[in-house]
Amino acid sequence: MVKNNFRDEKQEEVSRLWLDSDKKNTLILGTGFGKSKVSMLILEELFNSNILSKDSKVLILSDSEQLRDKNWKEDFDKWGFSWIWDLVISECYQTAYKWQDTKWDLVIADEIDFGMTEEYSKFFINNSIDMILGLTGYVDPIKSELLNSIAPPIVRYSTQEAQKDGILNDTQVVFVEYDLSQEKDDITVEYMDKGKKKSFTQSENNAYAYYENKCNILWGKITKLEEDPDVVFGLDPAKISEAKTLRYNFNKTTQKRKDILLKSNAGKKAAKYLIDKILESDKNKVLTFSAYTDQADAINEFTYHGKNKKGNKSLDELSSGNIRSLGVCDAINRGKNLVGVNNIIMESYTGSKTKFNQRHGRGMRLLPDQKMYLYILLPYYYKTIQSPDPNIGSRIVRRSTQMVKWAENMLEGFKVVNPIRIRI
């Protein structure tokens, strides 16, 4: 059994590593570990050792107004450092990247990976900064080179390492398979025929099978054409134009295929079924992530997302227990501390490892001996395969959709231990 003070010891160890560095570094600490507490320990030492004074210029960068104006202030109050909060400036990356020639003794770059874009990183390039304390829970590998040039990571302590050490509660991954709907009127398709608008209906299963097949055909043509020397060396304008047209049509087709998955009727039913089952126990709270706001609204009675978050108290209501189920999209990927969420449903997603790690972290606020259940929905579809032997005929087979492949991508690097697999 890990000692109760292990988290404190680990936080102090991490703080000391940054203080003993050149003080322009990033700490990658899994969600729930206590990044704000670490920053307070560092600030306290910097002031106690007179590296910082009341005349120093300290900036906290955040990725949202909620963090900028509320969450950070609450953390300073919580740890007894209100007097330091009165000395710092708190701002968002979305504003600070426009600044030039400002001077700072210390910049605390919260969720620094958010700032590692060509646009937002201008703040670090165009301003004078003596010390940088970068904080984040996960860094996408494609941002690593830029981060290394600004504030290289010196600590990597993942959520799963903290779980293994007993600092954070465990995660039980549950893969939930379901089949796309085969109702004939799932989707209405409109088209023009001789100047007249016409339409027909089809099931989301058949629509997905159609677009999946079309994507494969288009991709085969694109691959063959883009390997043609006349295209590679720009020698045949007609073939180059054809390749561009094919890629345009491929992108349109993949978007239609994607929309079927992210707006799936079967996905709605599967999520609702899980939510109802989970809420049979009054000890449970459930947070359901959807890719689209309309999908979230169709599944959940209460939602919090980009279209309705202004004045929305649902996050507080969930934490207080006044509601026990909430549907969300991207609005709470970062920086939201939710109390008692012991079930998370990933209803629809696009394969982002960064978003997955952030969303997984929303369930890391339980006691270390508790368990959070993480449900990942996996849609499948049926297609007809024609045998080349006419004596055999055709066969209907079940195949994984693109979202199953996205799940594999977003779980890359996440060690799934003893997963449960169910089918509904």
Image (spheres, grey):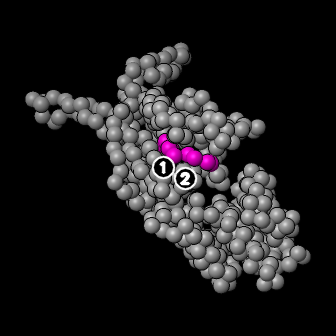
Identify which residue, 124 or 376, lies in the foreground.
376
Give the vertical position of 275 relative to 13 (above or below): above
The answer, for residue 313, to whether it is visible in the render is yes
On residue 244, which mark appears? Answer: none
Tell me the residue at 45%/22% (across/down): 186
Q: Position of residue 53 (x, y in %)?
A: 86, 78
Q: Secondary structure at mark 1?
A: strand
Q: Secondary structure at mark 2?
A: loop
Tell me the residue at 48%/21% (across/down): 188
Q: Position of residue 106 (x, y in %)?
A: 77, 74
- Is 254 on the left-hand or right-hand side of 122? left
Number of numbered tags placed on the structure image: 2
The answer, for residue 255, to whether it is visible in the render is no
Identify which residue, 408 or 395, lies in the foreground.
408
Q: Identify the residue position indicated by label 1 in the image.
A: 372
Tell me the residue at 39%/19% (across/down): 184
Amino acid type shown at disc 1: Met
Tell me the residue at 52%/64% (across/down): 167
Name the image quarter holding residue 25: bottom right
Amino acid type shown at disc 2: Leu
Which quadrant is home to the C terminus? top left
- Distance in Å between CA atoms under marks 2 and 1: 8 Å
The magenta-colored residue range is: 338-346
Q: Identify the residue position indicated by label 2 in the image.
A: 366
